[in-house]
Structure formats: C-alpha cells, structure tokens
Amino acid sequence: MRLFASSCSSPLFEILGLFDPEKMEPVEQEFDGKKVQRFQYTVKDPNTGQEKYWIVSKRRSEQVDAFLIEGHNLLKIQRLGSGNDTRYNILAA
C-alpha cells in the first residue's frame, strides 16, 4: 500500500509517519521512459500501526536520512500539488 494514494488530489496533504531506518531499500523504477534508482521506505502510521510504502528520489531520501541519523523517526510529511508539480516538505514531528 502506498503512502500517498494517487487519487489524493488535495493541494495540501499531510501525514505523520514512523520511519524504520532498517526498512529502506533501493528500488528501480521507470520514469519518463528511463530506469532510475529510487528508495523505498516502510512507514508506519503511529495511530493504527498500519505499514505503507513511500518511494522517493535520491534527494528526498537524503532529506529523510538526515532526520533518521539525528534520531528523528517520527516525521511529518506534507505533499503540495500533484503530478509533475508535486513537492514534499519533511519535518521532524
């Protein structure tokens, strides 16, 4: 199950997620007809315990990892926009 459903079209969408640094793995995806390396995180909902996957770019992964290295496993993720105009803000919760 994906962290942000593709049907979510709200201009601002926010979730709180518990990241496990041991449950991150590189994955290969096709983007604009090319194979690119992405990183898949397993994120747990702190309220329900349900696990979901979040696949991100190298830059976004580096942002998440910076929080994890500092010991911040509970992160607030804000998604702004949709499609190619999607932007994410990642904050320690």
Image (spheres, rainbow, N blue to C red):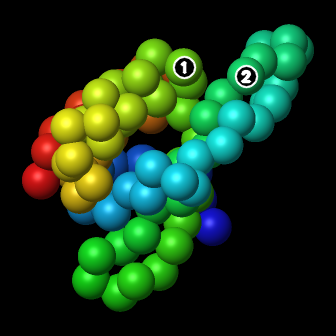
Q: Which residue is mark 2?
A: 37
Residue 25 spot, x, y in % from top left: 66, 43
Q: Which residue is mark 1?
A: 58
Residue 43 spot, x, y in % from top left: 45, 61
Q: Can residue 80 be spotted in the picture?
A: no
As drawn, 9 above or below 59: below
**Residues at marks 2 and 1 touching, judged by CB atoms closer than 8 Å:** yes
Q: Amino acid at mark 2?
A: Gln
Q: State which quarter of the image contains the N terminus.
A: bottom right
Residue 48 spot, x, y in % from top left: 35, 87
Residues packed near mark 2 inside 10 Å, few (<14), some (14 to 19) or many (20 plus): some
- What residue lies at 28% left-to-right and 76% top-to-bottom? 46
Residues packed near mark 1 inside 10 Å, few (<14), some (14 to 19) or many (20 plus): some
The reply, left or right, for residue 92 in relation to residue 65 is left
As drawn, 72 above or below 69: below
Q: Amino acid at mark 1?
A: Lys
Looking at the image, the residue that sits furthest to the bottom is 48
Kindly state the secondary structure of the residue where label 2 is placed.
Answer: strand
